[in-house]
Amino acid sequence: MSRKLFEQEEEALIAGINVTPLVDVVLVLLIIFMVTASFIVRETIEVQLPRAASGGETVGTTVNLVLDERGVLYLDGKEATLEEARRAVRELARQGDDARAIISADKRLAHGRVVEIIDLVKSEGLSRFAINIEKDSTASPGP
């Protein structure tokens, strides 16, 4: 009789939930997430942006146009021709009123090349665009 009672107590103690497999699965998922997240890195082009005291964040559907110091055009991180940029801007303009272009140009680049890109954006029907700047906390905004 006492042996039966002892076995019942032992079974009652073991009846708890074993969380070890759950922890194993969570850790494996975490490792998979960390490994795949490292592959989703956005390509960037090194440019020295002009500084300005005022500026804001942009939201919505965007296309990123970058001009480096040599005047080479990049479309969303990949080198592109003017015609490729024109097609991308035209496609974005069809998506609606929230679409906009973000133009980033190296501060050492000639002004005319930037104007050319602004003209491209406007001529393809995209009236909303932003000039990317580096926020300068030391300069005071104009009147």
Image (spheres, rainbow, N blue to C red):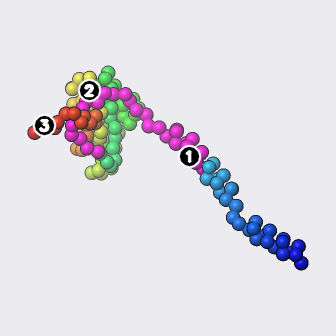
Residue type of the residue flagged with mark 2: Lys
What is the span of residues highlighted in magenta in the rendered image? Answer: 29-57
Q: Tag 1: Cα neighbours inside 10 Å, few (<14), some, or many (≥20)? A: few
Q: Horizontal and vertical percent for residue 3?
A: 88, 73
Residue 33 numbered mark, or none: 1
- Which quadrant: the N terminus? bottom right
Position of residue 121 in the picture relative to residue 88 (left or right): left
Q: Is residue 8 at all visible to an observer of this figure?
A: yes
Q: Is residue 93 at all visible to an observer of this figure?
A: no
Element marked by disc 1: helix
Q: Residue 139, relative to residue 98: is it above or below?
A: above
For label 2, the residue is: 107
Residue drawn at x 65%, y 57% is 22
Foreground mark, 3 or 2? 3
Q: Earlier in the sequence, mark 3 or mark 1?
A: 1
> How far, Cα to Cα, is label 3 from label 2?
19 Å
Residue drawn at x 31%, y 23% is 69
> How far, Cα to Cα, is label 3 from label 1?
47 Å
Position of residue 92 in the picture relative to residue 138 (left or right): right
Residue type of the residue flagged with mark 1: Phe
Foreground mark, 3 or 1? 3
Towards the viewer: 71 or 143: 143
- Which quadrant: the C terminus? top left
For label 3, the residue is: 142
Q: Horizontal and vertical percent for residue 36?
A: 55, 42
Q: Reply yes or no: does residue 135 show up in magenta.
A: no
Residue 41 numbered mark, or none: none
